[in-house]
Amino acid sequence: MKKNIAVLEGDGIGPEIMREGLKVLDAIARKHGHSFTYIPAPFGAKAYFDYGHPFPEQTKGICDGADAVMKGPVGLALSEMNRIPTEMSPEPAALLPLRKRYETYANYRPVFLPKSCADFSPLKPDRIGEGLDILMMRELVGGIYFGEKIEGKETKMQYARDVSDYTAEQIERFAHVCFNEARQRNGQLTSVHKANVLATSRFWNQLFESISVKYPDVNLKSMLVDNVAYQLSVNPTQFNGVMALDNMQGDILTDQAGGILGSLGLMPSACLNLQTGKGYYEPAHGSAPDIAGQNIANPYSMIGSVALMLEKSFGLGQESRDVWAALTNVFAEGYRTKELSRNTPLEKVLSTSQFGDKVAEKIMAS
């Protein structure tokens, strides 16, 4: 197989963890006889300083022509971010436009922690039980993030407004993805909402319930978002399966999930449009400029995003499983990255590049 991949390194630790993602992808190519061509493109805060825009036209052209996009996190230190006009900051001027350009409405964020790695979590081992295996699905292009906005400065600081809109089409296409993913897992789907207050949540619930009749093999459970936040801390294994979240609730609860795992460095993600096949793959965490250049960032999230790309965009299921197995095996041998290294012998603490080396070695040896 030959594929062209747009590579958006991003900012902060982005270039470091991207190198490890590509290292692992190269190992997959060697083992299985594939050919991946990487096309670098500027994106993020550094792109603003270098090109005058965080999502330059040349990057849009490269992404348009690529078979998939790998993207690193964006954002620099606060002192540098303060030099960027609000309307040109990476989130409103690059990240949201990237999502909208390809209408990547389905955001996959796997929350996986085997029992053998329960020590990663700040929760007691009995809360982790036999392990966590939750696929958090976040609707990514609707809701309050994309609704009408009125800034306070436009009203002489009298009020501001963010409008949350969802159409039936947006919810229904997302719901079908969630039901299908639940069908492929353990048949459990938890729909998260705030229906006791929000009209959009009541609309969401009504559509999920009407669609559920088409999936009799999936057990649909609905739960208020505030209760979900509580239950994730006291009994997270009840959510093993699939969780369906709207845009803002998904943004918040997936970060909480990273806290339960013990590191946002364990949170890969895929952002896809199932109708067009366009998508991009990124860590769910930020750019961590405070540790950039130190070779200590955990590249698991970037490497896991590679595994998702192999499966979701390229249909390479075995290759994807090879990556996941290698990641699991590195941890099973007692290796840890710095932020996970509580009580870990120094010789078992891996740098960013060493972790990528270990994963690549496991792939080639399997």
Image (cartoon, rainbow, N blue to C red):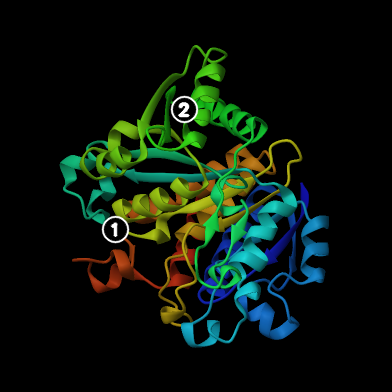
The residue closer to the viewer here, 78 or 11, is 78
Q: Which amino acid does label 1 sit on?
A: Gly
Q: In which quarter of the image is residue 258?
A: bottom left
The residue closer to the viewer here, 357 or 311, is 311
Circle nearer the N terminus (2, 1): 2
Horizontal and vertical percent for residue 103?
Answer: 70, 46
> From mark 2 to mark 1, how far is it between C-alphas?
28 Å
Q: In this view, does 352 lie above or below 282?
A: below
Q: In this view, does 79 lie above or below 152?
A: below
Q: What residue type is labelled 2?
A: Arg
Residue 209 shown left or right of residue 43 in the figure: left
Residue 34 visible? no
- Tell me the tag on residue 334: 1
Q: Which residue is drawn at 77% across and 68% down?
A: 59
Q: Which residue is drawn at 26% across and 42% down?
A: 115
- Tell me the tag on residue 194: none
- Could you say whether the residue bearing mark 2 is in a helix, strand or loop? loop
Horizontal and vertical percent for residue 64?
Answer: 81, 56
| Crowdedness near tag 2: few (<14), some (14–19) or many (≥20) residues, C-alpha within 10 Å | some
Q: Which residue is drawn at 48% across and 58% down?
A: 301
- Could you say whether the residue bearing mark 1 is in a helix, strand or loop? loop
- Tell me the tag on residue 185: 2
Q: Nearer the viewer, mark 2 or mark 1?
A: 2
Residue 214 shown left or right of residue 341 in the figure: right
Horizontal and vertical percent for residue 181?
Answer: 53, 30
Number of residue marks: 2
